[in-house]
Image: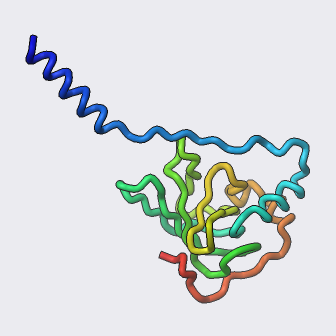
């Protein structure tokens, strides 16, 4: 009986020590009756960077909660104007991470403390570019990226 109790204590301790952090995604509520134009203007104003780019690489370090996504920028409305930039996002599920795919083009609304620490998630207006063509038109002409690489590039 003592061995069974000791085994249960050991198993319970191991399970508690290996327990991962619980995360939950929580976005702000929708913005009521705003028009698409008003939503785009608000998202642009609140973002550190806004651009359309193609995902060229995704780095998923096993020990990190975040993934790093490398983009080839096609057009920019705000933020760095480099040909390639990177940003972070969660892995998905409860952490609000956006699930990017290599080779796909996205309209990205990124936030960050500065232009070298950009991130995005499902709470932003980030979306597959072919789905938000009208939104891209509302943003206007934008700017083409410079030939230099950004300090954000991998």
The outermost residue toward the bottom is 147
The number of discs equals 0
Residue 4 as seen in the image, left or right of residue 110: left
Looking at the image, residue 83 lies above or below residue 45: below
Q: Nearer the viewer, residue 106 or 31?
A: 31
Looking at the image, residue 27 lies above or below residue 154: above
Q: Position of residue 126 (x, y in %)?
A: 68, 57
Residue 21 in which image quadrant: top left
Tell me the residue at 75%/62% (across/down): 46
Residue 32 as seen in the image, left or right of residue 145: right
Q: Position of residue 125 (x, y in %)?
A: 72, 55
Looking at the image, residue 8 lies above or below residue 115: above
What colour scheme was applied to this rendering of the protein? rainbow
Looking at the image, residue 36 lies above or below residue 8: below
Residue 33 in which image quadrant: top right
Q: Position of residue 18 (x, y in %)?
A: 30, 38
Q: Nearer the viewer, residue 23 or 129?
A: 23
Tell me the residue at 64%/49% (across/down): 122
Q: Nearer the viewer, residue 74 or 115?
A: 115
Tell me the residue at 82%/59% (across/down): 42
Q: Quadrant of the N terminus?
A: top left
Residue 107 as seen in the image, left or right of residue 69: right
Tell me the residue at 46%/38% (across/down): 22
The outermost residue toward the top is 1
Residue 77 in which image quadrant: bottom right
């Amino acid at each position: 009986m003592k061995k069974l109790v000791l085994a249960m204590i050991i198993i319970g301790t191991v399970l508690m020590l290996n327990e991962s952090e619980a995360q939950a995604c929580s976005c702000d509520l929708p913005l009521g009756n705003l028009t698409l134009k008003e939503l785009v203007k608000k998202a642009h104003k609140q973002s550190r960077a806004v651009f359309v780019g193609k995902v060229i690489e995704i780095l998923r370090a096993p020990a990190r909660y975040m993934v790093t996504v490398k983009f080839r920028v096609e057009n920019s409305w705000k933020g760095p104007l480099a040909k390639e930039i990177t940003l972070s996002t969660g892995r998905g599920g409860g952490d609000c991470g956006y699930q990017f795919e290599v080779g796909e083009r996205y309209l990205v609304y990124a936030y960050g403390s500065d232009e070298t620490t950009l991130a995005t998630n499902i709470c932003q207006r980030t979306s597959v570019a072919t789905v938000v063509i009208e939104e891209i038109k509302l943003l206007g002409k934008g700017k083409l990226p410079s030939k230099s690489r950004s300090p954000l590039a991998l």
